[in-house]
Image (tube, helix red, strand yellow):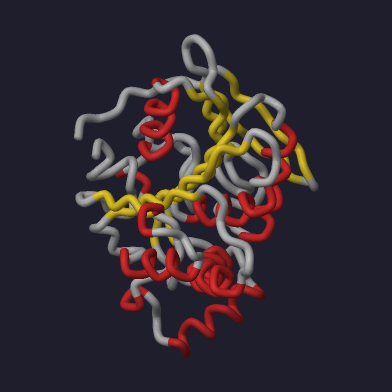
C-alpha cells in the first residue's frame, strides 16, 4: 500500500469538560455537507495515524464532515500520557458529541478501544435527532487468550496498577507507532510499554463488552461492525460471539478478508 498523503484539517480546536482540556480536529468536504461523523481513535494513538487519515479522506470525499477527538492522555489533549479510564473516555466523548449536535445528520465511528467508547456512547446518544448509525472498526470485544498472561500474573498486575497506574514494570504490551504514525515523525502517538492501568482497562473492556451485550435488554440501534479476518488481537470468533449476544443480525458484520487489527490503515484498508 502506498504511503498516504496527509489531508490537513480545516480547524484544530479545544473542548473543555470536567477538568479535561481536549484537542479535536475538523475536516470539511467540498460543497454541501451530508452529515457529521464523530470518530474515536484507538489506545495510545491520536489523529495523526494512517487509520484516521484513511477514514477521514474516504468520508470527506463522500461529502461528510469528520470530527476527531483526541482522548484524554492522548495526542494534544491534557492528561497523563496514554493513561486510560474507559468510563471517563465514554463520558467525555459523549459530552463532546452532545456539545456539537444540531448540525443535521450525524454518525459515530471508532477503532479498537475507540470502537468500545462509541459502543457505549451510542447507546445514550442514538435517540437524539439526526442519528444515522455507528460503525465499529476492529472493536475490542474479545482477545486471543494466548496473548493474556496467566491469571496469577494478571492478578498481581491489577494490584500494581492500583498503586502505580502510570508504571509498566516492563510487563505490558509495547506500543510501536512507526508503522502507523502519519506523518512518520509525529510525536502525538505513545511509544513504549502501556501504563499498567491502561492494560487493565483494555483487558476489562474486552470482557465487559460481551458481558454487557448479554445483559442488555435494549438492542443496538443501527450498528455496523467491520472487522479483519486476519485480526490476531481480537479474533473474528470473538466478534461473532459479540454480535450474537447483542442480537445484531449477520448482515451487521462486514469482514475484511485481508484486514488485521490495524484495519483501515494497514493491509485490507483499500478493501
Identify the residue at the far bottom of this view: 152
User: Would residue 14 be visible to someone looking at this image?
Assistant: yes
Front residue of 191 and 224: 224
Residue at (77% x, 42% y) in the render: 17
Does residue 190 show up? no
Tell me what residue is drawn at x 47 percent, y 11 percent: 30
How far across and how far down the image is residue 82, in percent? 55, 53
Residue sticking out furthest to the right: 18
Relative to 219, is 58 on the left or the right? left
Horizontal and vertical percent position of residue 215: 60, 74
Above or below, 240 against 211 in this view is: above
Which image quadrant is residue 179 in?
Answer: top left
133 sits left or right of 61 in the view: right
Residue 153: % across, % down: 46, 85
Q: Name which residue lies at 50% across and 52% down.
A: 115
Observer-nearest residue: 219 or 237? 219
Q: In which quarter of the image is the N terminus?
A: top left
Tag count in the figure? 0
Q: Is residue 13 above or below residue 253?
A: above
User: Residue 150 at x, y = what percent?
Assistant: 40, 86
Q: Locate the C terminus by quadrant.
A: top left
For image coordinates 54% across by 73% down, the residue present is: 214
Amino acid at each position: 500500500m502506498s504511503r498516504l498523503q496527509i489531508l490537513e484539517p480545516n480547524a484544530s480546536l479545544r473542548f473543555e469538560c470536567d477538568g479535561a482540556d481536549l484537542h479535536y480536529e475538523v475536516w470539511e468536504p467540498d460543497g454541501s455537507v451530508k452529515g457529521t461523523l464523530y470518530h474515536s481513535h484507538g489506545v495510545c494513538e491520536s489523529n495523526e495515524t494512517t487509520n484516521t487519515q484513511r477514514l477521514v479522506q474516504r468520508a470527506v470525499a463522500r461529502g461528510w464532515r469528520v470530527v476527531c477527538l483526541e482522548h484524554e492522555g492522548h495526542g494534544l489533549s491534557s492528561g497523563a500520557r496514554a493513561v486510560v479510564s474507559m468510563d471517563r473516555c465514554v463520558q467525555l466523548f459523549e459530552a463532546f458529541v452532545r456539545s456539537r449536535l444540531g448540525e443535521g445528520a450525524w454518525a459515530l465511528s471508532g477503532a479498537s478501544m475507540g470502537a468500545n467508547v462509541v459502543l457505549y456512547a451510542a447507546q445514550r446518544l442514538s435517540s437524539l435527532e439526526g442519528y444515522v448509525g455507528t460503525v465499529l472498526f476492529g472493536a475490542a470485544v474479545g482477545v486471543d487468550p494466548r496473548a493474556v498472561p496467566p491469571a496469577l500474573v494478571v492478578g498481581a498486575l491489577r494490584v500494581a496498577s492500583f498503586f502505580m497506574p502510570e508504571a509498566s514494570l516492563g510487563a505490558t504490551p509495547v506500543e510501536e507507532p512507526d508503522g502507523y504514525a502519519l506523518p512518520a515523525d509525529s510525536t502525538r502517538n505513545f511509544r513504549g510499554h502501556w501504563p499498567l492501568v491502561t492494560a487493565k482497562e483494555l483487558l476489562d473492556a474486552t470482557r465487559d463488552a460481551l458481558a454487557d451485550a448479554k445483559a442488555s435488554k435494549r438492542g443496538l440501534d443501527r450498528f455496523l461492525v467491520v472487522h479483519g479476518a486476519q485480526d490476531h488481537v481480537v479474533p473474528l470468533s470473538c466478534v461473532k460471539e459479540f454480535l450474537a449476544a447483542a442480537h445484531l443480525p449477520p448482515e451487521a458484520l462486514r469482514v475484511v478478508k485481508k484486514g488485521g487489527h490495524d484495519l483501515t490503515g494497514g493491509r485490507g484498508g483499500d478493501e
